[in-house]
Amino acid sequence: FFTEYKSGKCIYKQAIVEKSQANKSLSVLVREGLVKVHAKLEDIASIFISTGPGSFTGIRVGLAWLYGFLSGLDQNIEVHGESSLKFALEYLSSSVKGKEDTFLLISDTMRSGYLAYMSKSGSIDLSQCSLEDLEVLSNKWKDSKQTIFIDKSWESASCLLSSKQLEHIQYSRLDISNFGVRAMIKQSESLKTSFDCVEPHPYYLKKSSVEERFENIAKELVV
């Protein structure tokens, strides 16, 4: 998922649907985005990348492509990474009236997913969440007031909440991704940013053939 922003306004966005073609599409996606908004590589001031939750392999490959892209540039570009789930919850919580606990659930498999929890104080915790975990949580939620957002593709979790007569608001996975991007950009414009700089992890010292291919493809973009 690739988005370009300028002055707080989205000027271009596109998504890769074919996972098997991602290695060919990612550089093309960036190149086409820059062409369509009449921008050059040197116009890029900062890059924000999701560090999960999601496919571990996908995140590694995405970071490998990013390092390959940066290594081919002469300029310094700020790179920041943060959980897209955290930012999606921050965006959604802004629509909640009053102060109450807010939750966001997204699927991983039919029986498990991820949970983002924002307390009344505004702090956010992220954790993995199975249907068994959700069963325990839902019993607690029956006696309290909270707002629950959920990825509509996680049907088994939604059915569980409905069986407990717990109201919840459904969004598509793409909408949730969009919410995360919007919140990420909004915070990036603040002088007080809490993003963590993305640094190469030791396991990148021994790259897989897939990661090396992504780095080489990314380098070709800036040659």
Image (cartoon, rainbow, N blue to C red):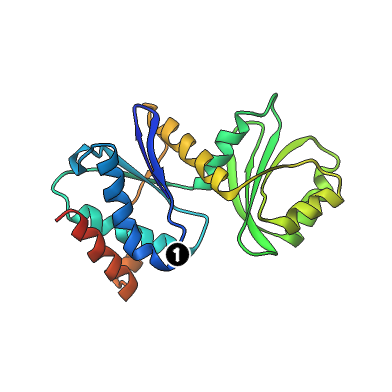
- Residue at 52 percent of width and 45 percent of height: 177
Q: Is residue 91 visible?
A: yes
Between 24 and 158, the one nearer to me in the picture = 24
Q: Position of residue 184 (x, y in %)?
A: 45, 37
Q: Is residue 136 visible?
A: no
Looking at the image, which residue sits at the far top? Answer: 98
- Residue at 30 percent of width and 49 percent of height: 30
Q: Is residue 108 above or below residue 5?
A: below
Which amino acid lies under the numbered mark 1 shown in the image of this protein?
Lys
Q: Position of residue 43 (x, y in %)?
A: 21, 37
Quadrant in which the C terminus appears: bottom left
**10 Å crowding of disc 1: few (<14), some (14-19), many (20+):** few
Q: Position of residue 133 (x, y in %)?
A: 74, 58
- Residue at 55 percent of width and 41 percent of height: 88
- Residue at 39 percent of width and 66 percent of height: 21
Q: Is residue 125 above or below residue 25?
A: above
Q: Which residue is mark 1?
A: 19
